Image: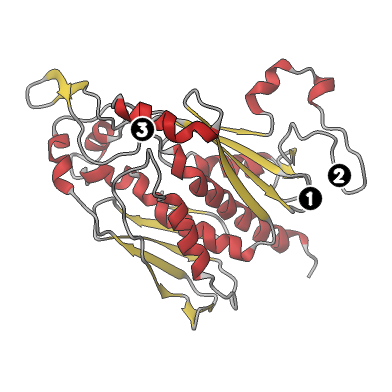
Amino acid sequence: MNTFGELFRITLYGESHQPTIGVVIDGVMPGLTLDEGLIREDLKKRNPEAIGTTPRKEPDQFEITAGHVNHVTTGSPLHLMIRNQNIQSKDYSHLKTHPRPGHADYVASVKYHNHHDYRGGGRFSGRLTAPMVMAGSVAKMMLPYAFEHALVQAGTLTDMTQLDAYLSQIQAEGDSVGGIIEVRVTGLPVGLGEPMFEKIESKIGALLFAIPAVKGVEFGTGFSGITKKGSEFNDAILDEKGTTKSNHSGGISGGLTNGNPLVVRVFIKPTSSIQKAQTSYEKTSGEVKPLKVGGRHDVCIARRAGIVIENAVAICLADFTLLHHARKEPL
């Protein structure tokens, strides 16, 4: 439930308004010099000073408490922890009886018999993506691949040079928009992944859908390929390295990497918590009533989710890479 991976395994813990959040990573190679600057840089990308992002600004000063000596990994489980500091739990007290539309408030109250931490979304909060980002930073330190991500659409906007003005308008309306993030990974070998249930798409998709607000994942051309015929969609192989003329399959054939760039696109839904008044069932009265969410929320979560998506892909590729060497290399 809280652990992902086979050889490169991550376990996330904590809630949005608990004292700490963090991750335990198993499978980190011994002798790896930890690039703490990369971790700080990735965490900053997750929480930039940008229009349309949450006013909750956590310093995200992390601590590494196990698994390393003198900034070099030992091979034992690596523990990274962040102390939550900018907490305003009073903003959420009314949610115990008045669940927010689009959130997990209602289903969590039923599943956990009202014992769940409702503050800031608790265990279901996007705050838990911070330790995932840290785990992905460590994964990238182990990998020789190149990663990049970009926000390619926000709401109806595709010209990202107009993003600030567009999100300012949405914010003035008290509303929110979603976005599409594209991640590209180059330098991958041929053959990462396994058939059937361990395909590249299967495992990457599973972790991406664990990220709050992710509602769609596609690889390569994805759903827009519906307009193409087989003769147009097929990626013609050009050389002995498997280089293809096109990349409609997003660098994956039969669930295995084919040596071409891995291309993943993710749809992040509009932020559920908005300033505009909504309606929702109120438990005490037994009636549907107006709901003012309050709190501090993003106008467009996708603006800062790119590094989360990128690092989630890195976590999966670290696991696949370790498995590839374990299963394929002769003794």
Residue 260 sits in which quadrant?
top right
**Is there any visible trace of residue 322 in the rendered image?**
yes
Q: Quadrant of the C terminus?
A: bottom right
61 versus 313 height, above or below: below
Mark 3, other Cα within 10 Å: few <14 / some 14–19 / many ≥20: some
- Specify the amino acid type for callout 1: Val
* Residue bearing mark 2: 242
Res. 214 in view: no
Amino acid under disc 3: Thr
User: Of the numbered discs in the image, which one, if any, rests on residue 269?
Assistant: none
Q: CA distance from mark 3 to mark 2?
A: 41 Å
**Residue at (44% x, 50% y) in the render:** 46
* 81 versus 132 height, above or below: below
Count of numbered marks: 3
Residue 220's place in the image compared with 26, above or below, is: above
Hey, what amino acid is under mark 2? Gly
Identify the secondary structure beneath mark 3: loop
Q: Are marks 3 and 2 in contact (CB under 8 Å)?
A: no
Q: Which residue is mark 1?
A: 190
